[in-house]
Amino acid sequence: MQKPTRIHLISHLKVTNDRAEEAKDFLKTEGYLNSKYLPIKEDNFVLWPLVVEAVPFKGEIVRCKGIKYVKQSRDYRSNLDDEIRDIAPRSFDIFGEIAIIKLVEDLRDYEKEIAEALLLSHTNIKTVCLDSGVQGEFRLRNLKLIGGVNNFISIHKENGMEFEADISKVYFSPRLATERERLSLLVQEGEFVLDAFAGVAPFSITLAKKGCRLLSLDSNPEAKKWALKNFSINSISTNQYNFYNSKFEEFDFKSEKFDRIIMNNPTNCLPFLEKALTLIVKGGIIHFYNICPKDEKFSIMNYINSSYECIGKREVHAYSPSSSLFAFDIRRNLI
């Protein structure tokens, strides 16, 4: 991004608009044009910035403030004072026009300065929220407005789709966009998929677009409202889609089995894996998301028996200095 800034006095060649291009060509050819500055347009005249005091071209030499483009860093920390620049977090989430940032306790006194730096560096951001972590049954972020407009509703765009939500009332993780795209490349049309902790249903909508049948669960009543709205926003039919406001562990699946199960509840997923294993067809896959230590001490094999195998593990994103969100692909064997 470029930001125009006025600086010290320099010489300009002032010519009429009808001679502007001729003057520009001459100045460039002869090496007189100062390419570090912008031309200035005034009524019927153009002022070309010069690297010399005068040039052999008909026009008026005017000495005035030049306009120089200064490259503006996308790293918001460049706008912070030295005392906090090096300890401010490099990364943050963006949901549409909302920035969501986590701060250690030592930085809480500087939250306003950090919010202002974010707004200055990213003109698309209108709201900055402090995230104190996910809490409660509905997995809601504990958010506090620290800068910009008091608004928690926005539209997130990813993989050619749009998802609208009130992030103060529903769970949504923009960091899983790559995972949603990955799963969309794995599924086959007609698969029956369970989205066990659906939130506003970004996984469900992504896979419904690929022709899958979906059953989505989330105990938050707000989640269903936004999920159905997002199906409409993306012009995707809900004919093969069912959303139930229910906890996964309490839902009566009767005799239903699924080709694929998505378990995106990374802070509290392990207690529900045993039940999920009973709901997958032979050859079916469970996509299990869990926050694990980076030291590789966690093994999903301790939680599944010989009827299942882990066919893939990948680090999705960092969660803390010592832990990350990992995706495990667990397949039920055919035999």
Image (cartoon, rainbow, N blue to C red):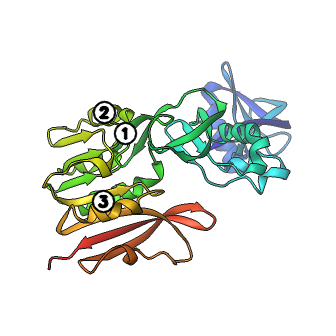
Q: Residue at 31% across / 76% down in the picture?
A: 311
Q: Measure how far apart labels 2 and 3 are at the Cα level.
A: 21 Å
Q: Measure how far apart labels 1 and 2 are at the Cα level.
A: 7 Å
Task: Check the image and report above or below for 88 versus 170.
Answer: below
Label 1 vs 2, first from the N-terminus: 1
Indicate which disc residue 226 carries: none
Q: Is label 3 in a helix, a strand or a loop?
A: helix
- Residue 312 lies, in percent from the top left, at 35, 74
State the residue position of label 2.
233
Q: Measure how far apart labels 1 and 3 are at the Cα level.
A: 17 Å
- Residue 18 lies, in percent from the top left, at 60, 26
Q: Residues within 10 Å of mark 1 (few under 14, many from 20)?
A: some
State the residue position of label 1.
162
Asked if residue 217 shows in the view, the reply is yes
Q: Residue at 40% across / 57% down in the picture?
A: 178
Q: Residues within 10 Å of mark 3 (few under 14, many from 20)?
A: some
Q: Does the CB distance between marks 1 and 2 fall below 8 Å?
A: yes
Q: Is label 2 in a helix, a strand or a loop?
A: helix
- Residue 254 lies, in percent from the top left, at 15, 52
Q: Which amino acid lies under the numbered mark 1 shown in the image of this protein?
A: Glu
Label 1 vs 3, first from the N-terminus: 1
State the residue position of label 3.
183
Quadrant containing the N terminus in the rendered view: top right
Q: Which amino acid lies under the numbered mark 2 shown in the image of this protein?
A: Ile
Residues 127 and 318: in front is 318
Q: Which amino acid lies under the numbered mark 3 shown in the image of this protein?
A: Leu
Please give left or right for residue 335 compared with residue 276 in the image.
Answer: left
Please give left or right for residue 284 compared with residue 299 in the image.
Answer: left
Q: Residues within 10 Å of mark 2 (few under 14, many from 20)?
A: few
Please give left or right for residue 121 compared with residue 62 in the image.
Answer: left
Asked if residue 31 shows in the view, the reply is no
Task: Check the image and report above or below for 146 versus 171.
Answer: above
